[in-house]
Amino acid sequence: MGLILSMVINRRYFLAGTAASIIASPGMALAEQNKSGFISALKTADGYAAARLDRTGQIQAIVPLPGRGHDVALSPQRTKAVIFSRRPGNFGVEWDLRTDRVTAEFASPDNRHFYGHGFFSPDGRLLYAAENNFEQERGCLGIYDAENNYQRVGEYECHGIGPHQAVLLSNQDTIALAVGGIATHPDFPRQKLNIPDMRPSLTYLDRRTGELVDQVFLPPELHQLSIRHIAEGPDKTVWFCGQFQGAATDGVNIVGFHKIGQSPELIALPTRLQRQTKYYAGSIAVNSDKSLIAVSFPRGNFMVIIDTISKALVGITESRDICGIAETGKRFYASNGLGQLIRQDGVEISQQDVLWDNHLRSF
């Protein structure tokens, strides 16, 4: 594996073990005007749902879901959203954002389930969804016709077990996959069946053909670091974060980056923060100009912001059970499992009588 980098700490933001978060400049507000709000899955007293929020964190619309939702795929026109069920669920729900109505529901095949993430093709005609072929213990990317009630029209091989997040890179030709390496089966809910033999990877496919473009594995001593979430940074770099399945005393780094054709590199948070992560990252997001990456650690109750060029730690936001992250221009907002929406400067801007789920999506 490539060099493991020590995290550079900017003393302006990190003093005496406590970091002050980035203060937004007036120009940031102008950049944010292109974003109208957020979408997140949630749980209410009446069951599971998805909500559309405005920029102040107030709920504008809610649609019910058949079960617990996970992440959201937005159409290129941002007129519709598909909410995927959380593993090991098998439903997808299309939400028309213009009418706030559910306009389609579909399911994975009987021998598959969704992992909770997916994306649309550049023209919006196809939806790609990370799936588990649990009988054969292999991951696949299901392909659905978004113009024909999401009929399943094919799949791509993911070349590994447990693909979680899948994203289309900015060249619109390459799919990046966080292949977590953990075997699961719906007959054994929440059980991880192959921890001693995990083999996580970053895998890249050609969007048009499904052919393997590149695949890199973590070194043997990190084979239990399940790569879960990814985001594209500058200069064709893919940032990733994971969830370590080994002994917590191992002190592993769980955030890194990779470029096709090279080896993945991990970055080291300060020791105190590394331990506080409990070696579990919940979400990752990049801002609009790809200058900053945000990573949440819900078990550690904080989020970090990292400069994508210098790899320096430039901000920390603390909040209990913080997990979902969305960008609005150059800055980030986050959600937590207590119903709060939080700015990256740590200011809580709303409190709702709901439990936000793991991911927050801006639109």
Image (cartoon, grey):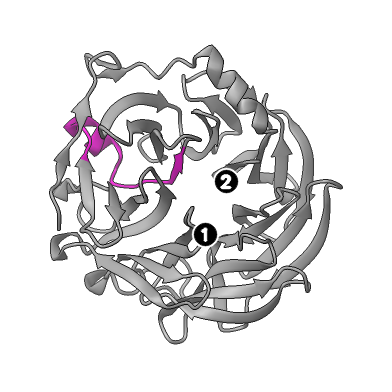
| Residue appearing at x 83%, y 46% in the figure | 98
Residue 189 spot, x, y in % from top left: 48, 69
Picture layout, residue 42 above or below residue 147: above
Q: Which numbered circle lies on residue 162?
A: none
Residue 10 spot, x, y in % from top left: 24, 20
Picture layout, residue 349 above or below residue 115: above
**Residue 94, quarter of the rendered image:** bottom right
Q: Is residue 133 left or right of residue 302?
A: right
Give the number of the mark in front: 2 or 1: 1
Q: Which residue is mark 1?
A: 172
Q: Are marks 2 and 1 in contact (CB under 8 Å)?
A: no
Q: Amino acid at mark 1?
A: Gln
Along the polypeptide, which appears first: circle 2 or circle 1? Answer: 1
Residue 176 spot, x, y in % from top left: 42, 61
Q: CA distance from mark 2 to mark 1?
A: 28 Å
| Residue appearing at x 68%, y 61% in the figure | 124
Name the residue nearer the viewer: 94 or 233. Answer: 233
Q: Amino acid at mark 2?
A: Asp
Q: Which numbered circle lies on residue 357?
A: 2
Name the residue nearer the viewer: 49 or 254. Answer: 254
Q: Is residue 261 left or right of residue 174?
A: left
- Confirm whether the magenta stretch covers residue 113: no
Residue 294 spot, x, y in % from top left: 41, 36
Where does the C terminus fall, quadrant-wise?
A: top right
Picture layout, residue 355 above or below residue 68: above
| Residue appearing at x 14%, y 46% in the figure | 4
Magenta residues span 268-286
